[in-house]
Amino acid sequence: MGLVSPIPRPLGEVPAPEHAGYRPAAHPRRRALAPLGVAGLLCVLVGSFVVAAGSATEPNLYVPGRTGGWPGWLAGPFQGLGLGIDQARFQTFTLVMCAGYLVVLACARAIPPRALVASILAAHLIFLLGPPLLSQDVFGYLGFARLGVLHGLDPYTHVAAAAAGDPVFPFLGWPFQHSPYGPLFTLASYAIVPLGLAGGLWALKAIAVLSSLAAVALVWRAAELDGRPPALAAAFLGLNPVLLEVALGGDHNDTLILLAVAGALALAAGASRRPRAAAALLAAGVGVKVTAGVALPFLVLSRGSWRGRLGLLTGAAVSLSVLAAVALVAFGSHALGFLSAVGEQQQLVATHSIPAETARLVGLHGIPAWWRQIFAGGFVAALALTLWRTARGADWRAMAGWATLALLLCTAWFLPWYAIWALPLAALSPSRALRAATLVFCAYAISIHLPLASPLLSAPQPTVAPLPRAFAVPAPIRPSGTLGADAARGIAPG
């Protein structure tokens, strides 16, 4: 019996990777979907522009930093456009962004790569030029930095209210909390203090945008190394409305966590993977926020042999040792003070955390300790299950993504921008279910600020009207109990 000759491949055609998650669209279908995908990109950009530029026109509830006044360096260059913003417009164009994002994901493989990359860059630029949205955290970063550099006070042992005469104080939303940020971020923030208040704000805005763009580039590269569609992975992260409007809009340092996780994913991808360097990078990310370390045990367990796991643990231990040495030199015996501040946060309850919302739904009065313990136990169980599955050979990125989602679902101190923690893991995971669950959770995070969700969510507690310059009387410290809608906008550091 003779051999059947293979069907000849047209000259210049490249065989598709044999990865199950990679299915390039046929050319006719690609031509049909491309205009729809470009329309989705335009929706994301138009929605982003109206939200960012409209919020810059005059003081409004979407810029909590207005409590310190409305200087031009706060409003940004969009101020003179006079677009304006109200609840209806904010909601409408946020939904336009979300709809466009879903269309882009559906058509990502058909969109010209240059158009996709240009749109990601443009969306990031729009929120760079807008005012700080939905949170005062960026002023908290400045407050802690100025506390250390200008006033000689340790932000792990002192609160911003100890320097109430500092120009940043009227812009703060949480002047009575210690810094929950790691020593690497705290020390790096000291370097921007000489730029002044305005210069420091714009430096932090630039850092947030650049770290987010770098994370998108690393996710693209990791997808290429793993034989996955890079455009889909990059769009999943880089055009996500929570990332754009909430995280970049609020200039949050959580984008540095994205950078650390995306860097680790890229280092651990492909045939020439460098898992030790990936483990060291995740450990270093703890110096920004402790949540950077959530993916570390999954990466360690992804190595099949005990020798390989020991090598990863060694790399992580070296990185943590360097971090500890730097912290000890800089902060002495209070080097681990940020862990105490994180513990303080976990005693708080954000109004729209899942434990708080479910307690309301079942008719509980407040959030009893036993209710929180149920959710804590649920997270421990989810963590144990995902670690066990990773040790048995499951994809470590998918398992780390599910564990991250479990953390977000179970913590009583959930703020909307935390939802971006799961994005890089979901973008590169082979699990469609994880990507779908991540999108659902992002939809919940974005809905917190939309009027249409008000009937479904806890009613916000009354808040004091914003003062034009400074707080006449310091707000009381609320170490426990349910915070109002101000919690979702940054009254405690996140």
Image (cartoon, rainbow, N blue to C red):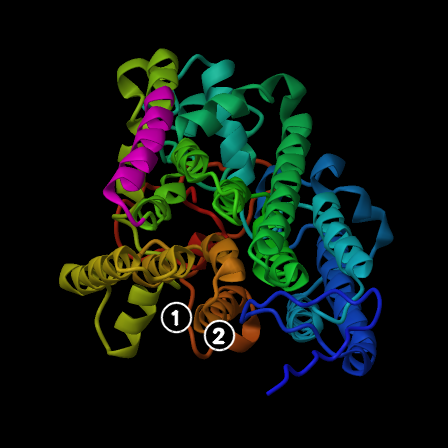
Q: Where residue 19 appears, x then y in whole percent?
A: 55, 67
Q: Is residue 314 magenta?
A: yes
* 404 vs 129: above or below: below
Q: Is residue 313 magenta?
A: yes
Instruction: Please identify the dominant SS of the magenta region.
Output: helix
- Contact between marks 2 and 1 (CB within 8 A): the answer is no
The residue carrying mark 1 is 458
Bounds of the magenta segment:
304-322
Query: Between residues 409 and 147, which one lies in front from this camera angle?
Result: 409
Quadrant of residue 372 in the image? bottom left
Q: Where residue 239 appears, x then y in whole percent?
A: 66, 60
Left or right: residue 28 versus residue 266 is right
**Residue 417's mark?**
none
* 484 vs 300: above or below: below
Q: Secondary structure at mark 2?
A: loop
Query: Between residues 433 and 408, which one lies in front from this camera angle?
Result: 433
Left or right: residue 331 versus residue 103 is left
Left or right: residue 367 versus residue 226 is left
The residue carrying mark 2 is 454
Badge 2 crowding class, 10 Å Cα cut-off, few under 14, some 14 to 19, many 20 or more, is few
Quadrant of residue 408 in the image? bottom left
